[in-house]
């Protein structure tokens, strides 16, 4: 709950700041996005040797503030950089099913969209989609371009992980243990647009993100878990 409150505060502060500085925001091509949905995780490395998947679906939430930079003054095409604040949860079971691991990871990441267009999605697609292709070729080409346009991104960041190991079976006498680890994160994903207002200010997107958290254990080994996100988001373009 505290994490959701923090994220909501970030959204409100970002919106208020950019709203009161609308001229600056328009010149700098700034946008704020909020994503949420379900996260699916799998343990790896040393953790994968002693734990299996637990409760498959966990919630995630993320706030993103981005900046679009045109390649030149004569085009709206460019690339976009962003800072992403997110909250991640994961759940794993010990191989013998005696205990479970409850993981919470607030994190910050840098995100890059290598192909970005500052304006109407339809206008941008019209400029890059090839013309005169046979229908059977045109459809997969259109789907491929649509999937990466203003959508494909790469992330790198760091998280403050909190790992709680607690009894999974009531009969097991286990004293709860909590450890904290600094987790490195890298990932990529697609967030294709599914709606855009006529003014191009508001957009709604789907979320298909893939990534991995990795950290060093107390004994010097390496543990990790992969996570996949499926969800939706909305963005306001200033």
Image (cartoon, helix red, strand yellow):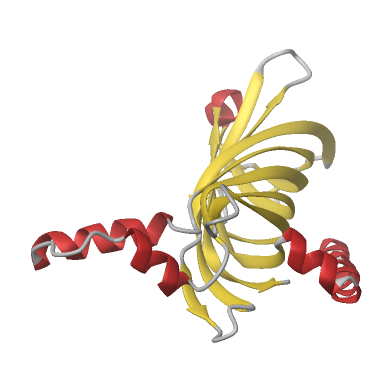
Q: Is residue 95 visible?
A: no
Rendered position, 231 above or below 46: below
- For the residue pair 106 and 132, the one nearer the viewer reads as 132
Question: From the viewer's perspective, is 9 left or right of 109?
Answer: right
Q: Quadrant of residue 185?
A: top right
Q: Residue furthest top?
A: 220
Tell me residue 20's x, y (percent). Answer: 91, 75
- Quadrant occupied by the C terminus: bottom right
Q: Quadrant of residue 146?
A: bottom left
- For the residue pair 216 and 123, the one nearer the viewer reads as 123
Residue at (43, 65) in percent of width and height = 124
Rendered position, 45 above or below 232: above
Q: Is residue 86 visible?
A: yes
Residue at (34, 58) in percent of width and height = 128
Residue at (36, 63) in percent of width and height = 127
Q: Quadrant of residue 67?
A: bottom right
Tell me residue 87's x, y (percent). Answer: 74, 55
Tell me residue 125's x, y (percent). Answer: 38, 66
- Quadrant occupied by the N terminus: bottom right
In this rendering, the count of numbered labels is: 0
Rendered position, 43 above or below 201: above
Residue at (83, 61) in percent of width and height = 3
Question: From the viewer's perspective, is 46 left or right of 159?
Answer: left
Q: Residue furthest front?
A: 74
- For the residue pair 19 and 228, the one nearer the viewer reads as 19
């Amino acid at each position: 709950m505290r994490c959701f409150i923090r994220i909501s505060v970030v959204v409100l502060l970002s919106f208020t700041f950019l709203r009161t500085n609308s001229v600056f925001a328009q010149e700098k091509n700034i946008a704020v996005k909020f994503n949420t949905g379900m996260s699916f995780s799998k343990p790896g490395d040393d953790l994968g040797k002693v734990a299996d998947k637990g409760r498959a679906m966990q919630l995630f939430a993320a706030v993103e503030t981005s900046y679009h930079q045109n390649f030149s003054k004569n085009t709206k095409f460019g690339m976009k950089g962003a800072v992403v604040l997110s909250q991640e949860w994961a759940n794993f079971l010990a191989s013998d099913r005696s205990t479970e691991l409850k993981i919470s990871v607030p994190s910050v990441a840098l995100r890059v969209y290598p192909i970005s267009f500052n304006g109407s999605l339809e206008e941008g697609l019209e400029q890059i989609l090839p013309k005169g292709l046979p229908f059977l070729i045109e459809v997969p080409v259109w789907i491929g371009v649509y999937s990466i346009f203003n959508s494909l991104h790469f992330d790198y960041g760091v998280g403050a992980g909190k790992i709680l190991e607690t009894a999974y079976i009531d009969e097991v006498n286990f004293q709860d243990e909590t450890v904290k680890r600094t987790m490195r994160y890298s990932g990529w994903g697609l967030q294709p647009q599914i709606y855009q207002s006529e003014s191009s200010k508001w957009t709604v997107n789907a979320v298909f993100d893939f990534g991995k958290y990795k950290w060093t254990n107390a004994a010097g080994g390496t543990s990790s878990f992969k996570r996949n996100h499926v969800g939706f988001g909305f963005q306001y373009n200033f």
